[in-house]
Amino acid sequence: MANWNNFRLDWQEHIQNVYKLVDKHSELAVRTGNKFHENSYKSLTNYLHELKTWIKHNEDLTKKENESKIKEGEKAT
C-alpha cells in the first residue's frame, strides 16, 4: 500500500465517527429546532471539510515526494 494512503487510513475511523455526530445533530436540529444542535451540525461539518482538505494536501505532498524519489532512483516508502 502506498505511503500516502496511510494519511486517509489513519483518520478514516475518526471521520466516520464525526459523521455519526453530524447525522445525530442534524436529526435533532430538525426535530427540536434547538440552536445547539444546529450550531453543532455546522461546526462539525466545517471541521470535517477542513480535516479532509488537510488529509488531501498531505496525501498530495507524500505522493509527489515518493514520485521524486523514484525518478532519482531511490526506494520510495
Image (spheres, rainbow, N blue to C red):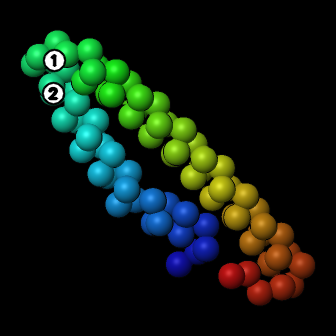
Going by the numbered disc 1, the residue's amino acid type is Val
In the figure, 20 relative to 60: above or below?
Answer: above
Residue at the far right in the pictured view: 72
Query: Mark 1, residues whose alpha carbon is within 10 Å: few (<14), some, or many (≥20)?
Result: few
Quadrant occupied by the C terminus: bottom right
Q: Are marks 2 and 1 in contact (CB under 8 Å)?
A: yes
The quarter holding residue 13 reads bottom left
Look at mark 1 in the image and give the residue it sits on. 30
Relative image position of residue 17 (x, y in whole percent)? 29, 51
Residue in the picture at 57% in, 52% down? 55
Residue at the far front in the pictured view: 36
Determine whether the residue tagged by mark 1 lies in a helix, strand or loop: helix
Relative image position of residue 20 (x, y in whole percent)? 24, 44
In the figure, 66 relative to 25: above or below?
Answer: below
Going by the numbered disc 2, the residue's amino acid type is Glu
Residue in the picture at 78% in, 67% down? 65
Distance from the alpha carbon under mark 2 to that under mark 1: 5 Å
Look at mark 2 in the image and give the residue it sits on. 27
Determine whether the residue tagged by mark 2 lies in a helix, strand or loop: helix
Q: Nearer the viewer, residue 26 or 70?
A: 26
Residue in the picture at 61% in, 74% down? 3
Q: Residue 16 bears which disc, if any?
A: none
Relative image position of residue 26 (x, y in whole percent)? 22, 27
Relative image position of residue 12 (x, y in whole percent)? 40, 59
Q: Is residue 4 left or right of residue 34?
A: right
Q: Nearer the viewer, residue 58 or 68?
A: 58
Q: Is residue 53 left or right of residue 11?
A: right
Query: Mark 2, residues whose alpha carbon is within 10 Å: few (<14), some, or many (≥20)?
Result: some
